[in-house]
Amino acid sequence: MKAKGKLAASALCLVAAVGLMAACAPQGSDATQGAEKTPPITADDLGRIGNNIGYADDGGTYLENYAEYAEKLKYADKVAENAENNEPAQYTDQFGFTTQPVPSDPKGWNVGYLDADNRGCLSCHESIEDVVMSLPTKHNVYAMGYPTQLTVANCLGCHRNAGFGNTQLVETLHGIHNGNAKFSGMNGSCDSCHYIDDSSTFNLWDYAKYDLYKGITNVKADDAKLGLSFDQDTVSENDQLFFESLNNEPSEWRTETDPAVADSWVLAIGGDVANPLEMTVSELKERFGTKSFVQKQGCIENATANAWIYQAELTGVSMKDIIDYVKPADGTTNIEVTSEDGYNMVAPSFTSVNVEDCLLVTEINGQPLPASQGYPVTLAVPRNSAASYIKAIMTIDFVNDPAFEDEGGVGTPLDPHTGMMQGKPNSAILNYPDGVVLDGQAGKELTIEGFADAYDEPIAKVEYSLDHGKTWTTLETPDNDPTRWTYWRMTYTPAEAGAYLLKVRTTSTQPDGSERVSSRDTNFLFNVK
């Protein structure tokens, strides 16, 4: 349709140009004398299309040719053919799952009318991670440990309209796409990324699409009969740990955990202290010993339905033992930590690190600290975000900074569209990607697993809906420990094949006892075959 529209416009311009030339030519000139008149513009010249049902070749109005409808127009055939011609696309994602982001529907509405297969980030890009690595300028690399698709919501964490000291997403994305030859070649338009609602507001398609799709099976809470449970002890495998790269050149990143590195890596701990020290990582472990704690690590930018989070057993030297030895001066406010790549943007408060379970991590789950997690030593601050999980550290300085403000809680970026904290609280599905195709699952019990977390706030409850949020089933989470994530499991038996939409709504308890509800519901589409 877009190509035909361009052709039609070209035809109009050509006809208009010819008309203007004729109008400007002097009457009776050689240019017009004896020439045949230009034939009138016909429907075909304009590029208009139609099937001529009810419009006979020999003329007549639609009403006069009423009998042709019964002969040529068959509704059932049209609907069936359109649905067949507009079956949504499937692909295999990076984790090996067959994925169909757009649900099938009996009329082919989602593809034929919404053009849903050609809208949203992943209709063009392999993944958001691939987008980041394909940028013409430097951007740190991120990788999800669980088979949860990274979405544009996480991009908004840093590059959001409210500002975070970074270039805003609305500026960069419009600049990159508009006029881009590849985007234009794919017939890209505003609709590729946006849904324009009845009030002419531009919404992100990847947010709005779930409420626009046809063909989703709605199941009331009483009929769904969900089985719900949770624990706070489940730990991630080492190959499920998300990571953000260091800032130095990729050629300088370590890919192995060579013990010789720990034997030679010198960590300098000083600043305003009585007993500064310099020791290798191996010497620190021998001098102070190690302790182990199960802790979660969640990125401060982790937005609704994303999974930049894990929980693992961390082993390392306790910062409390280090502090007792170096004896920081009275009035110490925070520590300044510098990584081997020069990163030192985050300065954890003294009170947050002067605890037994704040660790200089050297092992995860009983194995040497993975190279992607900052081998040979990384700082992990509990009851905080992974912004304080500083990798490959080389120096720690205790300081008294009058300008330092301990906010006394984890403040996440604001969702630019809701004005609420983004990802606090949050939930995501961890064992399947959004849009997963589940063959042979109709009539069989399905287990969906996920997490709920709110950094330093305990989770109060998690709610689940299979009818677009009309009815909910609630999982209460009493005596919740905010130092650990809440790992939940949901069992459900889909009665028949089709597309289903699971909405998850998470609530945490604020320090004053009031509830904090997630800024958005987590949406998870799954296709049962």
Image (tube, rainbow, N blue to C red):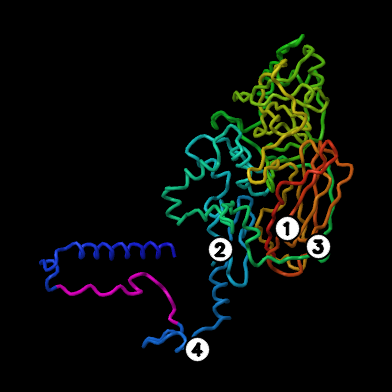
Quick check: marks 1 and 2 in contact, CB under 8 Å?
Answer: no
Q: Residue at x 12, y 71 (%)?
A: 33
Could you tell me which quadrant the N terminus lies in? bottom left
Q: Residues within 10 Å of mark 1 (few under 14, many from 20)?
A: many
Alpha-carbon distance for marks 3 and 4? Answer: 46 Å
Q: Secondary structure at mark 1?
A: strand
Alpha-carbon distance for marks 1 and 2? Answer: 21 Å
Q: Amino acid at mark 3?
A: Ala
Residue that badge 4 annotates: 71
Alpha-carbon distance for marks 4 and 1? Answer: 44 Å
- For the residue pair 300 and 339, the one nearer the viewer reads as 300
Q: Residue at x 58, y 76 (%)?
A: 80
Q: Which mark is residue 221?
A: 3
Q: Residue furthest left?
A: 30
In the rendered image, residue 412, in percent from the top left (x then y), is placed at 70, 37
Q: Residues within 10 Å of mark 2 (few under 14, many from 20)?
A: some
Q: Which residues are magenta?
A: 35-52
Quick check: marks 3 and 1 in contact, CB under 8 Å?
Answer: no
Q: Earlier in the sequence, mark 2 or mark 4?
A: 4
